[in-house]
Amino acid sequence: MDKKQVIIITDGDQYAQHTIDYIAKTLGGTSLSAFAGNPSVYTSEDIIKAVYEAKVNPVYVLVDDAGVFGIGSGEETILALVHDPIITILGVVAVAAHTKNMEWSRVALSIDQDGQINEHGVDKEGVPIAEVGRINGDTVYILDQLNLPNVIAIGDIGKMHGYDDEKKGCPITRKAVELILERGVPIE
Protein backbone atom coordinates (compact mmCIF):
# COMPACT_ATOMS: atom_id res chain seq x y z
CA MET A 1 0.00 0.00 0.00
CA ASP A 2 1.24 3.51 -0.82
CA LYS A 3 2.11 5.77 2.09
CA LYS A 4 -0.74 7.95 3.26
CA GLN A 5 0.21 11.53 4.06
CA VAL A 6 -1.82 13.08 6.85
CA ILE A 7 -2.36 16.57 8.18
CA ILE A 8 -3.86 16.49 11.67
CA ILE A 9 -6.32 19.22 12.70
CA THR A 10 -6.91 19.48 16.47
CA ASP A 11 -10.55 20.56 16.22
CA GLY A 12 -13.67 18.73 15.16
CA ASP A 13 -16.70 20.99 15.52
CA GLN A 14 -18.96 21.95 12.60
CA TYR A 15 -16.94 25.07 11.79
CA ALA A 16 -13.77 22.99 11.55
CA GLN A 17 -15.53 20.36 9.42
CA HIS A 18 -16.81 22.94 6.91
CA THR A 19 -13.45 24.72 6.83
CA ILE A 20 -11.46 21.55 6.16
CA ASP A 21 -13.93 20.44 3.47
CA TYR A 22 -13.37 23.82 1.81
CA ILE A 23 -9.56 23.55 2.16
CA ALA A 24 -9.54 20.05 0.65
CA LYS A 25 -11.60 21.29 -2.32
CA THR A 26 -9.39 24.32 -2.94
CA LEU A 27 -5.92 22.96 -2.14
CA GLY A 28 -6.52 19.29 -2.89
CA GLY A 29 -6.59 16.22 -0.71
CA THR A 30 -9.16 14.19 1.15
CA SER A 31 -11.15 15.59 4.06
CA LEU A 32 -12.23 13.08 6.69
CA SER A 33 -14.62 15.60 8.24
CA ALA A 34 -17.34 12.93 8.34
CA PHE A 35 -15.30 11.26 11.10
CA ALA A 36 -14.98 14.45 13.15
CA GLY A 37 -17.03 15.55 16.13
CA ASN A 38 -16.72 17.38 19.40
CA PRO A 39 -15.77 14.86 20.62
CA SER A 40 -15.45 12.32 17.86
CA VAL A 41 -17.45 9.14 18.36
CA TYR A 42 -15.28 7.18 15.95
CA THR A 43 -12.48 4.93 17.11
CA SER A 44 -8.87 5.25 16.04
CA GLU A 45 -9.34 2.06 14.02
CA ASP A 46 -12.29 3.60 12.13
CA ILE A 47 -10.25 6.68 11.29
CA ILE A 48 -7.17 4.74 10.20
CA LYS A 49 -9.32 2.58 7.95
CA ALA A 50 -10.73 5.77 6.37
CA VAL A 51 -7.19 7.13 5.90
CA TYR A 52 -6.21 3.89 4.11
CA GLU A 53 -9.25 4.21 1.84
CA ALA A 54 -8.56 7.86 0.94
CA LYS A 55 -7.82 8.26 -2.76
CA VAL A 56 -5.91 11.56 -2.65
CA ASN A 57 -3.10 12.85 -0.41
CA PRO A 58 -2.94 14.73 1.85
CA VAL A 59 -5.61 13.30 4.12
CA TYR A 60 -7.01 15.81 6.61
CA VAL A 61 -7.88 14.15 9.93
CA LEU A 62 -9.84 16.16 12.48
CA VAL A 63 -9.39 15.11 16.12
CA ASP A 64 -11.14 16.58 19.13
CA ASP A 65 -11.66 15.31 22.65
CA ALA A 66 -13.83 18.23 23.83
CA GLY A 67 -11.45 19.24 26.59
CA VAL A 68 -10.94 15.88 28.30
CA PHE A 69 -7.83 16.30 30.44
CA GLY A 70 -4.86 14.14 29.51
CA ILE A 71 -5.07 11.59 26.75
CA GLY A 72 -8.62 11.71 25.42
CA SER A 73 -10.08 10.25 22.22
CA GLY A 74 -8.40 12.93 20.08
CA GLU A 75 -4.95 12.17 21.46
CA GLU A 76 -5.56 8.43 21.15
CA THR A 77 -6.23 8.94 17.45
CA ILE A 78 -3.07 11.05 17.08
CA LEU A 79 -1.03 8.29 18.73
CA ALA A 80 -2.53 5.66 16.43
CA LEU A 81 -1.81 7.77 13.33
CA VAL A 82 1.78 8.45 14.38
CA HIS A 83 2.54 4.79 15.06
CA ASP A 84 0.94 3.41 11.90
CA PRO A 85 3.60 2.22 9.40
CA ILE A 86 1.59 3.26 6.32
CA ILE A 87 0.97 6.84 7.53
CA THR A 88 3.33 9.80 7.35
CA ILE A 89 2.38 12.89 9.34
CA LEU A 90 3.07 16.03 7.30
CA GLY A 91 2.13 18.38 10.11
CA VAL A 92 -0.45 19.53 12.60
CA VAL A 93 -2.77 22.53 12.64
CA ALA A 94 -2.87 23.03 16.42
CA VAL A 95 -6.02 24.92 17.33
CA ALA A 96 -5.97 27.15 20.39
CA ALA A 97 -8.81 27.05 22.92
CA HIS A 98 -9.83 28.47 26.25
CA THR A 99 -9.30 25.25 28.13
CA LYS A 100 -10.34 24.68 31.71
CA ASN A 101 -7.53 22.21 32.23
CA MET A 102 -4.81 24.34 30.63
CA GLU A 103 -3.42 21.71 28.31
CA TRP A 104 -0.64 23.18 26.23
CA SER A 105 1.89 22.31 23.57
CA ARG A 106 4.95 23.78 21.94
CA VAL A 107 4.46 24.88 18.34
CA ALA A 108 6.90 25.67 15.53
CA LEU A 109 5.13 28.94 14.79
CA SER A 110 1.74 30.61 14.91
CA ILE A 111 -0.48 32.46 12.49
CA ASP A 112 -2.51 35.23 14.08
CA GLN A 113 -5.98 36.41 13.05
CA ASP A 114 -4.42 38.91 10.62
CA GLY A 115 -2.48 36.15 8.85
CA GLN A 116 0.86 37.19 10.30
CA ILE A 117 3.36 34.44 11.09
CA ASN A 118 5.08 34.86 14.44
CA GLU A 119 6.97 32.96 17.10
CA HIS A 120 4.45 33.68 19.86
CA GLY A 121 1.46 31.49 20.52
CA VAL A 122 -2.09 32.66 19.82
CA ASP A 123 -5.32 32.47 21.77
CA LYS A 124 -8.69 31.16 20.60
CA GLU A 125 -9.40 34.42 18.76
CA GLY A 126 -6.04 34.28 16.98
CA VAL A 127 -4.56 37.11 19.03
CA PRO A 128 -0.85 36.67 19.85
CA ILE A 129 -0.05 35.79 23.47
CA ALA A 130 3.08 36.60 25.46
CA GLU A 131 4.47 33.07 25.48
CA VAL A 132 6.85 32.12 22.70
CA GLY A 133 6.17 28.90 20.80
CA ARG A 134 3.35 27.63 22.99
CA ILE A 135 -0.45 27.45 22.90
CA ASN A 136 -3.26 26.24 25.13
CA GLY A 137 -5.77 23.90 23.53
CA ASP A 138 -8.18 21.02 24.06
CA THR A 139 -6.52 18.31 21.99
CA VAL A 140 -2.84 19.26 22.09
CA TYR A 141 -1.65 17.43 25.21
CA ILE A 142 0.26 14.69 23.40
CA LEU A 143 1.87 16.77 20.61
CA ASP A 144 4.99 17.66 22.60
CA GLN A 145 5.78 14.04 23.32
CA LEU A 146 5.68 12.91 19.69
CA ASN A 147 8.24 15.15 17.96
CA LEU A 148 5.83 15.86 15.10
CA PRO A 149 6.87 18.01 12.15
CA ASN A 150 5.34 21.37 11.28
CA VAL A 151 3.10 22.05 14.28
CA ILE A 152 1.40 25.33 13.31
CA ALA A 153 -0.84 27.12 15.83
CA ILE A 154 -3.94 29.10 14.89
CA GLY A 155 -7.00 30.41 16.71
CA ASP A 156 -10.36 28.66 16.62
CA ILE A 157 -10.65 27.28 13.09
CA GLY A 158 -13.32 28.83 10.87
CA LYS A 159 -14.04 31.52 13.47
CA MET A 160 -11.62 34.02 15.06
CA HIS A 161 -14.31 36.74 14.98
CA GLY A 162 -14.85 36.16 11.27
CA TYR A 163 -11.19 36.41 10.24
CA ASP A 164 -11.18 32.76 9.13
CA ASP A 165 -14.67 32.72 7.62
CA GLU A 166 -15.29 30.56 4.56
CA LYS A 167 -16.70 33.62 2.73
CA LYS A 168 -13.19 35.07 2.99
CA GLY A 169 -11.61 31.81 1.84
CA CYS A 170 -10.62 30.55 5.32
CA PRO A 171 -7.33 32.47 5.01
CA ILE A 172 -5.81 31.53 8.38
CA THR A 173 -6.44 27.79 8.10
CA ARG A 174 -5.44 27.88 4.44
CA LYS A 175 -2.13 29.56 5.28
CA ALA A 176 -1.40 26.98 8.00
CA VAL A 177 -2.06 24.10 5.60
CA GLU A 178 0.00 25.75 2.85
CA LEU A 179 2.94 26.12 5.26
CA ILE A 180 2.68 22.45 6.19
CA LEU A 181 2.57 21.43 2.53
CA GLU A 182 5.55 23.66 1.69
CA ARG A 183 7.62 22.21 4.54
CA GLY A 184 6.37 18.62 4.34
CA VAL A 185 7.35 15.69 2.19
CA PRO A 186 6.26 15.67 -1.47
CA ILE A 187 2.67 14.62 -2.14
CA GLU A 188 2.52 11.54 -4.40
Image (cartoon, helix red, strand yellow):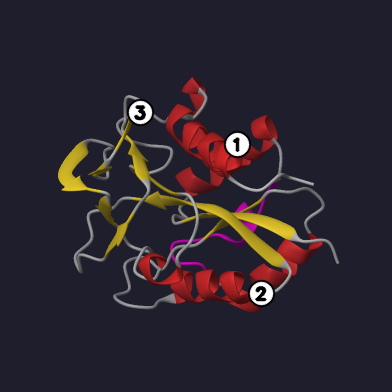
Identify the secondary structure beneath mark 3.
loop
Question: Residue 10 occupies which quadrant of the picture?
Answer: bottom left
Which amino acid, mark 2? Asp
Left or right, residue 101 beside residue 176? left
Give the magenta part as a residue range.
30-40
Q: Which mark is residue 84?
A: 2
Q: Give the labeled residue for mark 3.
A: 162
From the top left corner, tell me how far across and down residue 62 is, in percent. 54, 57
Identify the secondary structure beneath mark 1.
helix
Does residue 154 sit above or below 134 in this rendering? above
Does residue 94 sit above or below 155 in this rendering? below
Query: Mark 2 or mark 3: which comes first in sequence?
Result: 2
Which residue is pictured at 35% across the width and 43% down the height? Answer: 109
Q: Nearer the viewer, mark 1 or mark 2?
A: 2
Extreme-right residue of the structure = 1
Does residue 163 sit above or below 150 in this rendering? above
Q: Give the labeled residue for mark 1.
A: 23
Question: Residue 70 occupies which quadrant of the picture?
Answer: bottom left
Q: In the rendered structure, are the residues bearing label 2 and label 3 in contact, judged by CB atoms less than 8 Å apart?
A: no
Residue 115 seen in the figure: yes
Left or right, residue 172 beside residue 21? left
Which amino acid, mark 1? Ile
